[in-house]
Amino acid sequence: MIDITKAKKAFKLFLERYKTDEDVLGFELKIVHTYHVVDNARLIAEKLKLSDEDIKLAELIALLHDTGRFEEITYLKQFDNATFNHAEHGVKMLFEQGLIREFIKDDSYDEIIKVAIANHNRLAIEDGLDERALLHAKIIRDADKLDNFRVKKEEKIEAIFPGRVKDKEHIETSTVSDKVYETVLNKECVNIYDRQTALDCWVCVLAFVYDLNFKETFEIIKENNYIDVLIDRFAYVKAKTKERMETIRGVIKEYIEEGLK
């Protein structure tokens, strides 16, 4: 049995362990992000008309998906997927260190939770998952990416990429590297190891649309006009950069329209 109310109370207690680190840049952002992802996961699961059990399971996975991020920001003082795999670390905390039992006593969901969290930040979902595990891996990936668009719209730039992007000007004077640009035009997600510039980090987020799984997610992105809002957040200094960003805008918005069909 999944009790989301109790799980959320346990999550608050979990955060108390990092209370002294609440002033670290990005810490509060990740707390807010987590709760938004929970809401997104529930919304997607409801739109898919899943059972009450699977709706609650989707919420629980979302609540726990970034567990490893709080260790990362505490010890590294930055978010860096290239050097610290927060999903794998979160799985270790939950299932090797036994943290999962603080959120749910029933162990019958463990494998689905583990697989979904482990896959939520990968470039692509691993092969060989059973139907239910694959469904929940897709839900958390969509829910997480959906809130990444909100975060990039609302939060301070220095809090979004602590340790990697200094400020708004850092992106505005930056460029899109050739490899990242070609990847976006090929309608593929950007490999984090290919990012070379501050703007590459931003474009990497825009390219998340290529990994979305549900029409419902595309609808939310279009309703919030996320692509235009995120691209127009900056006044790009270099003419070539402006041109590339406009091309990226057109390609991605066309892809979204296809996803709505």
Image (cartoon, helix red, strand yellow):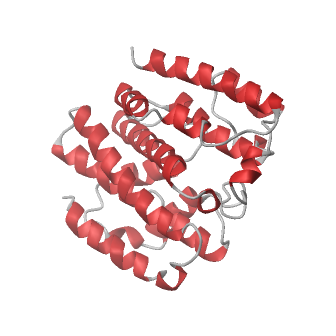
Where 193 sits versus 13, above or below?
above
Q: For the point 52% across and 56% down, which residue is it?
A: 155
Where 242 sits versus 98, above or below?
above
Q: For the point 68% across and 36% down, which residue is it?
A: 190
Q: For the point 81% across and 30% down, which residue is it?
A: 239
Does 108 sit left or right of 188 as displayed? left
Q: For the point 37% across and 36% down, which residue is it?
A: 135
Q: In x, y percent, where is residue 242? A: 74, 30
Count of numbered circles on the image: 0
Is residue 95 among what the camera can see?
A: no
Task: Name the outermost residue toward the bottom.
Answer: 20
Q: Nearer the viewer, residue 198 or 195?
A: 198
Quarter-of-image position of residue 217 = top left
Image quarter where the C terminus lies is: top left
Q: In x, y percent, where is residue 157? A: 62, 56
Quarter-of-image position of residue 189 = top right
Does 93 sit left or right of 109 as displayed? right
Where 121 sits versus 64, above or below?
above
Image quarter where the N terminus lies is: bottom left
